[in-house]
């Protein structure tokens, strides 16, 4: 059996329940959301350490604020990560499952390490929450930061192994005919690529600090000098990190097989242009970080999204070398479940407006005051949930009665 | 087949079982806890008793730190463990239920947004909106259970799906409703345990006593309702599953259900005695002990659920060794046993020795090693001192004197109601027998 036969034979016999391009779009979109949040967590951890180290009042205050960002951000990053993890298994299943099984031990170690990183993040946040301003400690943040880098290395390795199908067999089948079942393979580290994922952490965190500064500027109980410090720090951080990320991007480009001619790929070209434009815009905002925070954030996300598209285009190039294309994956379209997801997705956006507006307004009032939220917003959100339940439960009862599975 | 991952002594299946058992406590707490929290918060506003809000804050923090660290990561952990232990099994579930999982993901996002806003805005937004945020979380969490139960139940009873291939036909299968009701009742029980433990740390004596008693009542109602629904669940099990259990084809299933039942009873008694009659007895020590009992009961219950599925990992569709068991015409899926019997199992493997000379003993052992790992290794340890149905010991019971004796056993595998048939041609069987015989001699 050759490689192309293997990867195509290993596609799931059930086929796809909808068209591959839809899954591909969802994969890229949800990965962009996930990696943005991962970047924020990683960047916040190291910025918190740096700011504590300097031991000035504003730095320590910022460091404590970032403690909360690390824990909340990590939760959100994990939940957001579920979606790309799901969609990659749908359309790239032969690659995902093979690479993960070959490195099964490391895949499970990833979970152990991320759990420890999470608790270390909580250790940093809760440990400093009640401490005096000048007493912030960074021990747990160091632990969290180190563990986060380790998880980045594991995930990078698992991604890279998927792109190296031509080596899979030689890793575990010896010339004598013995096969290894240890699941301990660890291959394919490319520091250019890894850095191109890590350096944007500081750019994203920098833009976040600009948003933070902009968001609290109307609060009378906030020290405006502190907000200015945070905003400018964020803009400079975002600028330098973006420049370095562009450099790492070109390093990565140099590592890509020349036969791909990836420098001429439209997604790469658009990504490079948008990345440079974003960097230039951030450069223009270093003295007005509060005013330019929102457009900088939008541009930053657009850059990340296009980079994710370019990454997807690169993955397709690699996989086409193994004779694999998602576009000829057999499709057994299942319209009812497809409608269920997209209808729920739209409803979810509607429902999420409630926590979003509540969080926004709660942060806008002075400490000790209470924000009043329009009661109809919460009522509508909860009603939408109950409506979803009634429709699906009703559908379930009808189907169960029809199929004779209820009693 | 994908590369095989072997966990010495324990098997990879046990790794999934451990993570899954560990996942159930935080995930059922996450789904059940907020109904209780919202109840207490509502009471606090309605009766103008702000002292109750201390509990609300503490309980929410527990849910954040426990459920959204351990719960969410062990949830992803099950996925990873299933990926490395049974990649074709999880792939089958995903390719049939990707939109179900994606729908659940939307509710995960709502959960995470609403719980953080709930925790951090207590006293910072108006009471009505805060309460509504609690309701939002409670509904989102329970709906995520409504969805995942469909996929879990599908693995046990695949319903009309085998005929139609339809998402909802598999989702709303025979054991869906009883499982949903049992899990729903049970989630109130688990929420009651944690609520009582947290309530025991409240400083105000009267509030502490009141909340422990209330948690105890929730727990008792949850556990009693759970027993009733569990009876319905057991009644609705597929005939094949009932036979494995009630005919004592697999006696360990009876032991597991007994352990689960005893654990259930102990927790119920804890609610009655410690929470309702002597609330002073509730504290971190007795709470942790009852959690350990719960953990054991859940482990036994999950082990039972896994056991009665045998020989399938997905009812009627896929065997435990990840081989497709039957045609599903609606999905253009073909049973694989006839294909492997005709073409040879080895010829469908990519990760295998390149050449197998049927007359070369070493070649046969290498080939047999690959075949046995792929066809047996999911459920059986292959080590002499393996803890999970170790094949060397099981084969020793038949006292084989030659590989041919084992060939006879392999030919009759399909006659055992809990075993998949051997898949492969004569060469595969010869190689597997040589290898299996060799491990009985180690």
Image (tube, rainbow, N blue to C red):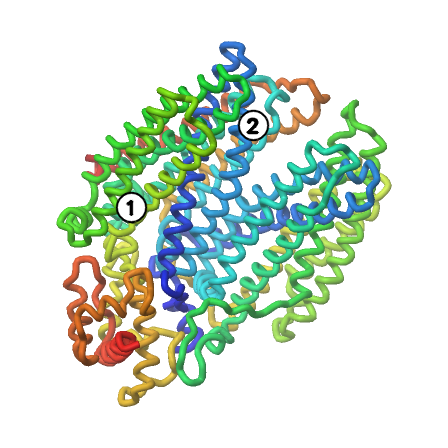
Residue B253 in the image: state x and y as whole percent: 23, 49
Quadrant assignment, res A198: bottom right
Above or below A264: residue A379 = above
Given residues B145 and B333, the one toward you in this image is B145
Which disc is residue B170 wearing?
Answer: 1
Above or below A387: residue A175 = below
Name the quadrant of the C terminus of chain A. top left
**Label 2 crowd bin: few (<14), some (14–19), many (20+), radius 10 Å:** many
Given residues A224 and A26, the one toward you in this image is A224
Q: Closer to the camera: disc 1 or disc 2?
A: 2
Discs 1 and 2 carry the same chain letter: yes
Name the quadrant of the N terminus of chain A. bottom left
Residue A285 seen in the figure: no
Residue A135 in the image: state x and y as whole percent: 76, 37
Q: What's the chain of the residue with tag 1?
A: B
Q: What's the chain of the residue with tag 2?
A: B
Residue A116 in the image: state x and y as whole percent: 57, 49
- Residue drawn at x 55%, y 68% is A186
Residue B27 in the image: state x and y as whole percent: 43, 39
Residue occupied by mark 2 = B118
- Residue drawn at x 15%, y 74% is B408
Above or below A115: residue B267 = above
């Amino acid at each position: 059996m050759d490689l192309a036969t293997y990867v195509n034979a290993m596609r799931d016999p059930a086929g796809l329940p909808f068209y591959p391009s839809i899954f591909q779009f969802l994969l890229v979109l949800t990965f962009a959301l996930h990696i943005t949040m991962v970047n924020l967590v990683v960047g916040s951890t190291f910025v918190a350490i740096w700011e504590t180290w300097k031991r000035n009042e504003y730095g320590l205050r910022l460091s404590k604020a970032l403690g909360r960002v690390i824990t909340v951000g990590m939760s959100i990053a994990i939940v957001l990560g579920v979606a790309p993890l799901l969609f990659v298994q749908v359309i790239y299943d032969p690659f995902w499952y093979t690479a993960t099984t070959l490195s099964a031990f490391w895949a499970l170690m990833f979970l152990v390490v991320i759990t420890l990183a999470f608790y270390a993040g909580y250790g940093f946040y809760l440990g400093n929450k009640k401490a005096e301003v000048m007493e912030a400690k960074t021990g747990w943040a160091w632990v969290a930061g180190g563990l986060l880098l380790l998880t980045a290395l594991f995930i990078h390795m698992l991604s890279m192994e998927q792109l190296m199908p031509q080596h899979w067999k030689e890793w575990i089948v010896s010339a004598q005919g013995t096969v290894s079942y240890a699941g301990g393979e660890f291959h394919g580290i490319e520091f250019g690529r890894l850095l191109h994922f890590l350096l944007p952490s500081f750019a994203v965190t920098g833009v976040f600090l600009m948003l933070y500064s902009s968001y609290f500027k109307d609060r009378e109980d906030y020290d405006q000098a502190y907000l200015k410090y945070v905003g400018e720090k964020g803009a400079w951080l975002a600028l330098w990190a973006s420049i370095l990320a562009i450099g790492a991007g070109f390093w990565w480009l140099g590592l890509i097989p020349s036969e791909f001619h990836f420098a001429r790929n439209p997604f790469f070209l658009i990504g490079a242009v948008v990345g440079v434009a974003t960097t230039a815009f951030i450069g223009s905002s270093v003295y007005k970080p509060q005013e330019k925070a929102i457009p900088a954030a939008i541009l930053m996300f657009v850059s990340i999204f296009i980079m994710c598209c370019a990454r997807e285009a690169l993955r397709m190039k690699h996989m086409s070398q193994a004779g694999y294309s998602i576009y000829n994956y057999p499709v057994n379209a299942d319209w009812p479940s497809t409608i269920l997801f997209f209808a729920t997705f739209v409803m979810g956006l509607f429902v999420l407006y409630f926590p979003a507006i509540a969080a926004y307004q709660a942060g806008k009032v002075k400490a000790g005051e209470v924000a009043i939220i329009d009661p109809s917003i919460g009522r509508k959100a909860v009603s939408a949930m109950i409506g979803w339940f009634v429709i699906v439960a009703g559908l379930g009862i009808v189907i169960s009665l029809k199929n004779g599975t209820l009693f | 087949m994908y590369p095989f991952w072997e966990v010495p002594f324990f098997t990879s299946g046990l790794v999934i079982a451990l993570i899954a058992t560990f996942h159930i406590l935080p995930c059922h707490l996450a789904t059940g806890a907020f109904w209780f929290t919202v109840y207490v918060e509502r009471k606090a506003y309605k009766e103008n008793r702000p002292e109750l809000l201390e509990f609300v804050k503490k309980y929410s923090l527990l849910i954040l730190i426990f459920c959204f660290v351990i719960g969410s990561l062990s949830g992803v952990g099950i996925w990873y463990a299933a990926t490395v232990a049974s990649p074709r099994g999880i792939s089958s579930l995903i390719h049939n239920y990707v939109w179900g999982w994606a729908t659940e993901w939307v509710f995960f996002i709502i959960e995470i947004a609403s719980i953080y806003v709930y925790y951090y805005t207590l006293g910072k937004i108006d009471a009505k909106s805060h309460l509504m945020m609690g309701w939002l979380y409670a509904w989102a969490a329970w709906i995520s259970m409504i969805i995942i139960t469909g996929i879990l139940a599908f693995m046990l009873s695949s319903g009309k799906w085998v005929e139609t291939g339809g998402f909802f036909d598999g989702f709303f299968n025979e054991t869906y409703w009883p499982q949903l009701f049992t899990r729903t009742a049970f989630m109130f029980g688990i929420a009651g345990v944690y609520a009582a433990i947290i309530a025991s740390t409240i400083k105000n004596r009267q509030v502490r006593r009141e909340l422990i008693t209330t948690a105890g009542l929730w727990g008792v109602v949850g556990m009693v309702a759970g027993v009733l629904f569990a009876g319905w669940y057991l009644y609705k099990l597929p005939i094949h599953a009932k036979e494995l259990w009630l005919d004592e084809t697999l006696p360990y299933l009876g032991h597991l259900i007994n352990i689960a039942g005893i654990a259930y009873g102990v927790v119920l008694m804890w609610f009655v005695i410690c929470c309702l009659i002597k609330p002073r007895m509730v504290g971190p020590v007795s709470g942790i002990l009852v959690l350990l009992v719960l953990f054991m009961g859940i482990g036994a219950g999950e082990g039972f659920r896994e056991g009665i599925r045998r020989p399938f990992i997905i009812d009627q569709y896929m065997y435990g060794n990840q081989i497709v068991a039957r045609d599903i015409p609606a999905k253009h899926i073909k049973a694989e046993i006839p294909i492997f019997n005709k073409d040879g199992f080895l010829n469908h493997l990519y990760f295998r020795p390149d050449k197998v000379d049927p007359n070369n003993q070493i070649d046969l052992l290498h080939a047999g090693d690959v075949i046995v790992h792929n066809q047996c290794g999911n459920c059986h340890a292959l080590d002499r001192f393996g803890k999970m149905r170790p094949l060397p010991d099981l084969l020793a019971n038949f006292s084989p004197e030659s590989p041919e004796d084992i060939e006879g056993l392999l030919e009759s595998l399909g006659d055992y109601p809990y075993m998949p048939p051997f898949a492969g041609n004569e060469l595969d069987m010869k190689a597997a027998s040589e290898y299996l015989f060799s491990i009985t001699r180690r």
